[in-house]
Amino acid sequence: MSSASSCRTGFLWSPLFETFDYGRNHPIAKGRFSSIRDHFDRVGLLAQANVSTLEAELLPEELLRQVHSPEYIKKVKMISETGVGEIDLDTPGFRGIYENARSTCGATITGVRGVLSGEIEHFYSPTGGFHHARHNAGGGFCVFNDVAAAVLEIKRAKLDRILVADFDVHHGNGTQDYFHDDPGVMQISFHEDPEWMYPHTGRIGECGDGPGKGYKINMPFPMDSGDAVYAFAFDELVPPLMEFYRPQFIIFLPGYDAHYLDRLAHLKLTTRTIKHVAERIHQAAHTWSSGRLGVLTGGGYSDDALLWGSGAVMSVLTGHGYEVPKETPPFEDNDEIWAEVRRNVEEIQQSVFPVLGLS
Ligand SMILES: [Zn+2]
Ligand SMILES: [Zn+2]
């Protein structure tokens, strides 16, 4: 096991990332990815000896064809050529969207390959984490599902226990769909209650099918959940699952959109908790996965919270210091929130854990 400060970490970049254009009022603003890169640069995270910048390649077409249907790929190409049409109601089309999506998703594959070859132990992509895209459709700001592509790429290396640790505030419905019956993929998803939150999936009962039953762990949080209940649920659920599964590769979405400043969701985390989760996942990667860990940015719609969270997570990977400004969440977890979170945690422990033989 290497000490944190010596972990070789790749930062993914391509000039193509910034060709996307969802329009002026879309939550994914132009300049989003370079704002993360510039922030890392400003605070010295990219200049460290153990950090290298890797040029992201395009998502290979053969992987793309495994992840998406020919009809859907054709639709994206058509929108890309004409600039007319949309992927979904909340996911506008634009000229060049096909190449753009192949670059943002390709970054994930370049990172995975770097880790598998041993060139790096961890990678950080300022984009990626498009967990809502499904075989035959995009949506939720996602065009192609890079998480699914990453899983397929990792499986080629004969690793058959892959953990998708998805802490994005929205449920990873696309990824869950692909691997619902596959015990080779454990997906732990912490997200806001699907009752009112997009994509309205991720209930505790959706725990996988057939041989994959029990390997999809969905932990929904009520509106206004903050640091204390989140850390409680993490400690109760995640360590026993990781110890049971002993993942050989971890793909991690940190959940910057669960921050209290986020404008699309209603959880109340501070960066402290996002960092705490990252520390535990990083530690687990060294304990179980020979350090193999890839971080995909996913959501995050407060500019400040996105940069603080990214900086904190990158500092965990690389072992270099990063200071988060003082944060003041609007309130603390109340009794009602505690009761619901405890109920959900217990339900998972009583209905999903036993399927895996965990008590
Ligand atoms: Zn490390
Ligand atoms: Zn999200």
Image (spheres, grey):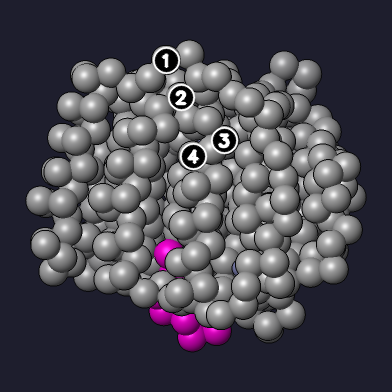
> Disc 2 marks which amino acid?
Lys
| Residue 153 placement (x, y as % from top left) | 57, 73
- State the SS at label 1: loop
Query: Gap in Å between the C-alphas at discs 4 and 1?
Result: 15 Å
Is 141 on the left-hand or right-hand side of 163? right
Q: Which residues are magenta?
A: 156-163
Q: CA distance from mark 4 to mark 3?
A: 5 Å
At 57% from the left and 35% from the top, the residue drawn is 271
Residue at which label 2 appears: 268
Q: CA distance from mark 2 to mark 3?
A: 10 Å
Q: Which residue is mark 1?
A: 331
Give the position of the N terminus as an image quadrant: bottom right
Q: Which mark is residue 271?
A: 3
Residues 83 and 253: in front is 253
Label 2 sits on a secondary structure element that is loop
Looking at the image, is mark 2 or mark 4 earlier in the sequence? Answer: 2
